């Protein structure tokens, strides 16, 4: 096995999972289901980008992630893959309800990441829904939202469901993703995010990705992450 970095916290030395996969460069070298690997292959994703290489070995062994990497570096797959794998390992099914919530700052970005989720997750049987406000009647969403396994949403629409949807159940959420977190805060969603996080189960995995590291991202990290792995990547272009 390749040695752990010398600055690795002592508590993690016994965890062989990370060290075994730390040097991987291709998705196929990581421990993941054939369904996800086939989905990646079908979309022509073979080699990992830097942020994916740095974060996936940690995220796939269940750790919280605070990831910073600039726009275009491939952050979407760095959380879509762990979401699919966590639910796959838990043998999540339709009747298990909402297992993962992915929050994105804008309708447009939410739509884009939803497309990636659908493409890479095509061989899984999870149900996923895009809850972005304005797009569909909220009443139709309210009837269906508990049947969805993965929610991709803007903060306002998610909080609206938490406030208004009868029996909306997010008590079993396994993985929370905060994508483009700096932009979520820029758009003025700090309070909304805090309200959302306070309603989610404490025992969960949280993946927080951002293009920049600011004071407000640190605050959000303190509020939402447990013993996170810090992954910062600044690729030369
Ligand atoms: P970010 O969220 O960091 O801005 P994205 O996840 O949107 O970046 O990815 C940026 C672009 O790079 C997308 O077009 C995506 O398809 C592509 N991409 C991401 N990961 C890979 C990869 N491993 N191999 C090839 N292309 C990739
Ligand atoms: Mg992105």
Image: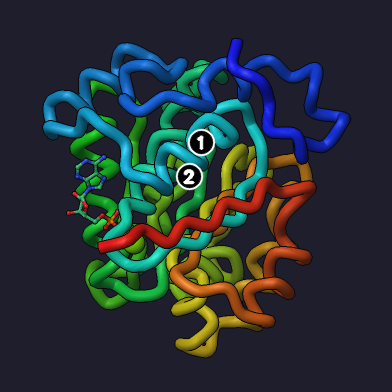
Asked whether the viewer can see residue 140, the reply is no
> For the residues marked 1 and 2, what is the alpha-carbon distance in whole angstroms?
5 Å
Mark linked to residue 234: none
The residue sitting at 58% across, 42% down in the picture is 175
Contact check, label 1 and label 2, Cβ < 8 Å: yes
Residue 93 percent coordinates (x, y): 45, 22
Vertical relation: 53 (above or below) 192: above
Relative to the observer, which residue lies in front, 227 or 155?
A: 227
Asked if 4 appears above or below 56 in the picture, the reply is: above
Q: Is residue 197 left or right of residue 111?
A: right
Whether disc 1's CB lies below 8 Å from ligand 2 is answered no
Find residue 181 and report its horizontal and vertical position in percent: 51, 70
Label 2: few (<14), some (14–19) or many (≥20) C-alpha neighbours in 10 Å: many
Task: From the viewer's perspective, tell me whether residue 201 is left or right of residue 41.
Answer: right
Q: Residue furthest right?
A: 10
Residue behind mark 2: 146
Viewer-closest of 9 and 57: 9
Q: Identify the mark at residue 97; answer none if there is no mark.
A: 1
* Location of residue 167 in the rendering, given as x and y in whole percent from the top left corner: 59, 52
């Amino acid at each position: 096995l390749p040695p752990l970095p010398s600055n690795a916290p002592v508590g993690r030395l016994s965890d062989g999972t990370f060290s075994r996969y730390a040097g991987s460069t291709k998705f196929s070298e990581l421990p993941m289901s054939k369904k996800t690997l086939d989905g990646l292959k079908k979309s022509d994703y073979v080699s990992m980008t830097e942020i994916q290489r740095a974060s996936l070995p940690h995220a796939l062994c269940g750790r919280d992630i605070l990831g910073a990497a600039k726009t275009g570096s491939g952050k979407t797959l760095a959380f879509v893959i762990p979401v699919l794998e966590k639910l796959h390992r838990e043998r999540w099914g339709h009747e298990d309800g909402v297992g993962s919530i992915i929050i994105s700052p804008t309708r447009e970005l939410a739509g884009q990441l939803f497309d990636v989720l659908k493409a890479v997750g095509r061989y899984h049987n999870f149900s996923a829904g895009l809850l972005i406000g304005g797009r569909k009647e909220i009443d139709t969403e309210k009837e269906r939202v508990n049947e969805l396994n993965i929610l991709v949403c803007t903060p306002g629409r998610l909080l609206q469901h938490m406030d208004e949807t009868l029996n909306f159940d997010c008590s079993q959420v396994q993985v929370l993703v905060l994508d483009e977190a700096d932009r979520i805060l820029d758009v003025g969603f700090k309070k909304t995010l805090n309200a959302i996080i306070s309603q989610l189960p404490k025992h969960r995995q949280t993946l927080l990705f951002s293009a920049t590291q600011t004071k407000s991202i640190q605050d959000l990290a303190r509020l939402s992450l447990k013993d996170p792995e810090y992954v910062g990547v600044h690729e030369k272009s």
